[in-house]
Image: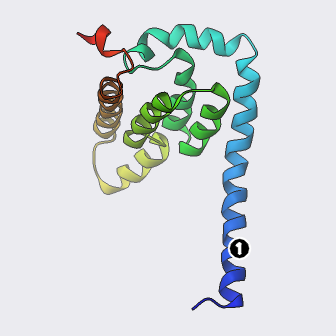
Amino acid sequence: MLTISTFKRGISNGLNITWELAKVVVPVYFAVTFLKYSPVLPWLSSLMSPMMQIVGLPGEASMPLILGYFINIYAAIGAILPLGLDSKEITIISAMLLMAHSLPIETAVSKKTGIRVVSIVIIRVVLSLLVGILFAVLLHTGSYEKLF
C-alpha cells in the first residue's frame, strides 16, 4: 500500500542514490571532456587503436573500458558520454564491461571465497575481450574482416 511515509522514503532513497552516482559520473565526465580537448586522449587513442579495432571500437573507447575495469561501471558511463560513440560501440563496451568490471573490488571479494585471484581476473578479462569480438562480429562493425 502506498502511503505518505513510503512515498517520502522512496523520494529520499532515490535522491541519495542519485547523489552517490553523480559523485562518480559528473567528475569523470568533466575529466574525460577535458582530456578530449588536450593532447592526452588523442595520444592514448592512437596508442590503443590497434588493439581496440579487434573489438570494433575506436581507440578513445579504451578510456571507458579502463575506468570500468578498474573503478566501476558508473565511471565508465561518465567516460562514454563525452566521446560521442554510436549505439553499436556503446553496446560493445557495455557487453565487455558486464564480463569484467570493478576488478579490484570484486577480486578482493572473490579472494575471501578462496578462489585463485589471478585465475579469475584472467578469465574475466579474456571473456570480456571474446564478448567484444563476438559483438563486433554480430553488429557488423567491420572488425571481423580484420579477424579472418
In the rendering, at what x and y percent does residue 127 appear? 30, 33
**Which residue lies at the image location 56% right of the left edge and 31% below the top edge?**
64
In the rendering, at what x and y percent does residue 119 appear? 28, 36
139 or 43, which lies in front? 139
**Which residue lies at the image location 32% right of the left edge and 32% below the top edge?**
131
Please state, as top left, top right, bottom left or bottom right, where the N terminus lies in the image. Answer: bottom right
Residue, disc 1: 11
27 or 54, which lies in front? 54
Quadrant in the picture for residue 116: top left
Mark 1 surroundings within 10 Å by alpha-carbon count, few (fewer than 14), some (14 through 19), many (20 or more) = few
Please state, as top left, top right, bottom left or bottom right, where the C terminus lies in the image. Answer: top left
Helix or strand or loop: what does disc 1 sit on? helix
12 or 145, which lies in front? 145
For this orientation, the residue located farthest to the left is: 148
In the rendering, at what x and y percent does residue 26 appear? 73, 42
Q: 55 left or right of 78? A: left
In the rendering, at what x and y percent does residue 69 appear? 48, 35
Quadrant in the picture for residue 100: top left
Q: Is residue 114 above or below residue 49?
A: below
Amino acid bearing label 1: Ile
82 or 40, which lies in front? 82
**Which residue lies at the image location 64% right of the left edge and 11% below the top edge?**
42
Q: 72 left or right of 112? A: right
Q: Is residue 46 above or below residue 15?
A: above
Q: Is residue 9 above or below residue 44?
A: below
Q: 87 left or right of 133? A: right
Tell me how the rendering is colored. rainbow
**Which residue lies at the image location 75% right of the left edge and 14% below the top edge?**
38
The tally of labels here is: 1
